[in-house]
């Protein structure tokens, strides 16, 4: 009998599973969860995807649980973010072998959170003697806290949080307006753990302890959580927007990333955006939005190209939000967005605050001296400081540049500062034809739900979209096509609970995690 079997014998209510079966369960769990995300979009699978992981953890030691959790996490991230290879080889000019190594390192780090979750859960069951009836609730709290940590630790990489799998599920995603995407993740884990408990209970031999309360309580909690979510969506949620609709035109130039920073291609790129902008004028938009760094030159430096952009705004009489690199007065380069008035003059500017590691700057450059950024042809960017809110015909809006939209707390700050609708400009050409552009859109859509605002998104190669406060994607473009998408938004009039209280649930779970770890340390000393 292997060591897992010996441990299981000491836990009379645990399943005894062969090692290979456990390995298959955790890998399958990772793949099932990945299938809930774009490009597969099988969102309901997220309510079942973690069940195999929980079954595999039955009767293991904390160390064994950590390895199983790590394997499950690794399979999930390899399936969900494999597109990183394309980004590094095509645009980072890294050899394929090095790109594979980098992908494994990134997925390995992210899988560490799943390993920590599995270790903590099993350690609590063994050392703190957690009643089986509350294990699903503990699991939900631990998972939520670790996702929250992943958002901020080491600059943060909150890509593919479990809750994002529900971006196409109307009733479930509305829960984000109360407790954020982390609350949806917690709900999914609670349901998965309760179902796993029921399945484990039915699979145990009849001669072993099979107290029905072990499954009745967690199933009841899961049912209450799901029914409360449905009730909130159907009875309590109210559209926080109102007022006169504002027409917005979103430009998608489809500029090849390999040509984007080529000086010889600057005029051709501007020709495309000018043509798209002039074509959108017939729709009478109040604002025309260009994508991230749509103009690959310094908009504040006088040249024939910059004068063309200013003249375009003046001739059409329509304000334009234009993505452009900028050389700040402090000598640093910034990834910026400029608001040009209908007279062609600059009315406001926002500098990107949350930069992409290895994309817009190289962290710990002394250690990674052999690496260059993925943005070829331009220097390291500086960090912006202000959460800028622009004004447009009495309405207020803020812009998030690319990666910033995946950070819930930072987007909430814009709304707290007075933004009534949100704009996301991005360049997703890096991702190629993969699920990444849709994954990015899913995260942006969740920001709209959390804050009860319309969100419009202009992407160089797509997906350009208009998102309602409910998270419904009202209109979107196909990737790698030229397009000018025109839609209407209504300004936000009231606050959602999430905008008002922020990540209160996630912070509560983080405090719980701290207390839980302290309890484990104390039990070890005893």
Image: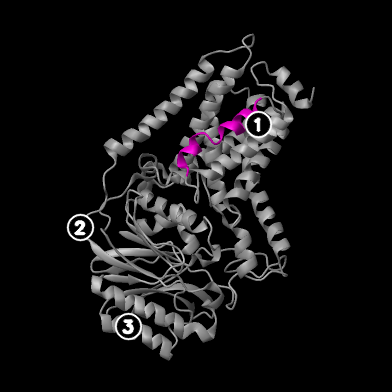
Asked whether residue 32 appears in the rendered view, the answer is yes
The residue depicted at 45 percent of the width and 86 percent of the height is 301
| 449, above or below 256, in the image | above
- Residue, disc 3: 312
Helix, strand or loop at disc 3?
helix
Circles 3 and 2, Cβ within 8 Å, touching? The answer is: no
| Residue count near mark 1 (Cα–Cα under 10 Å), binned few <14, some 14–19, many ≥20 | some
Residue at the disc numbered 2:
243
Q: Are marks 2 and 1 in contact (CB under 8 Å)?
A: no
Residue placed under numbered mark 1 in the picture: 520
Instruction: Give whichever of discs 2 and 1 has the lower sequence position.
Output: 2
For residue 288, above or below residue 51: below
Q: Nearest the camera: 237 or 433?
A: 433
Nearest to the eye among marks 2 and 1: give it.
2
Q: Earlier in the sequence, mark 3 or mark 1?
A: 3
Q: Position of residue 487 (x, y in %)?
A: 29, 62
Instruction: State which region is magenta.
Output: 42-58
Dominant secondary structure (helix, strand or loop) of the stretch shown in magenta: helix
Q: Position of residue 125 (x, y in %)?
A: 63, 26
């Amino acid at each position: 009998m292997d060591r897992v079997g010996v441990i299981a014998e000491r836990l009379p209510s645990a399943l005894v599973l062969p090692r290979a079966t456990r390995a298959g369960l955790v890998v399958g769990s990772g793949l099932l969860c990945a299938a809930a995300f774009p490009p597969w979009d099988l969102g309901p699978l997220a309510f079942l995807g973690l069940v195999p992981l929980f079954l595999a953890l039955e009767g293991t030691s904390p160390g064994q649980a950590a390895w199983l959790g790590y394997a499950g996490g690794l399979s999930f991230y390899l399936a969900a973010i494999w597109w990183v290879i394309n980004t590094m080889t095509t645009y980072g000019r890294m050899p394929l072998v090095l790109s594979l190594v980098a992908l494994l390192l990134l997925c390995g780090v992210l899988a560490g959170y799943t390993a920590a979750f599995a270790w903590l859960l099993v350690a609590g069951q063994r050392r703190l003697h957690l009643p089986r009836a509350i294990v699903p609730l503990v699991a939900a709290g631990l998972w939520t806290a670790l996702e929250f940590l992943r958002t901020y630790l080491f600059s943060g990489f909150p890509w593919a949080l479990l809750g994002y799998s529900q971006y196409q599920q109307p009733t479930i995603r509305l829960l984000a307006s109360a407790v954020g995407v982390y609350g949806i993740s917690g709900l999914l884990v609670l349901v998965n753990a309760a179902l796993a408990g029921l399945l484990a209970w039915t699979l145990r031999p009849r001669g072993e302890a099979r107290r029905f309360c072990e499954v009745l309580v967690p199933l009841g909690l899961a049912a209450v959580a799901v029914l409360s979510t449905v009730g909130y969506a159907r009875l309590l949620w109210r559209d926080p927007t109102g007022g006169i609709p504002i027409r917005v035109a979103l430009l998608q130039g489809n500029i090849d990333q390999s040509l984007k920073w080529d000086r010889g291609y600057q005029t051709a790129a501007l020709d495309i955006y000018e043509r798209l902008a002039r074509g959108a004028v017939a729709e009478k938009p109040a604002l025309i939005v260009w994508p991230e760094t749509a103009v690959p030159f310094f908009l504040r430096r006088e040249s024939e190209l910059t004068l063309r952009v200013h003249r375009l705004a003046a001739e059409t009489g329509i304000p334009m939000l234009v993505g452009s690199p900028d050389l700040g007065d402090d000598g640093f380069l910034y990834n910026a967005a400029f608001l040009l008035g209908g007279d062609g003059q600059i009315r406001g500017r926002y500098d990107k605050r949350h930069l992409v590691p290895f994309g817009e700057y190289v962290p710990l450059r002394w250690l990674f001296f052999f690496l260059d950024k993925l943005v070829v042809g331009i220097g390291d960017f500086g960090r912006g400081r202000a959460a800028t809110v622009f004004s447009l015909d009495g309405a207020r809006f803020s812009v998030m540049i690319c990666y910033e939209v995946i950070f819930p707390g930072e987007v909430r700050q814009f709304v707290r500062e007075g933004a009534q609708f949100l704009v996301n400009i991005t360049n997703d050409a890096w991702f190629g034809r993969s699920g990444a552009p849709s994954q990015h859109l899913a995260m942006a859509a969740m920001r709209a739900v959390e804050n009860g605002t319309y969100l419009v998104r202009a992407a160089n190669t797509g997906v350009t979209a208009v998102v309602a406060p409910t998270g419904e994607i009202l209109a979107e473009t196909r990737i790698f096509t030229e397009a000018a998408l025109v839609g209407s938004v209504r300004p936000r009039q009231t606050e959602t609970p999430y905008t008002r209280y922020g990540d209160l649930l996630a912070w509560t779970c983080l405090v719980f995690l701290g207390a839980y770890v302290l309890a484990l340390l104390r039990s070890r000393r005893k």
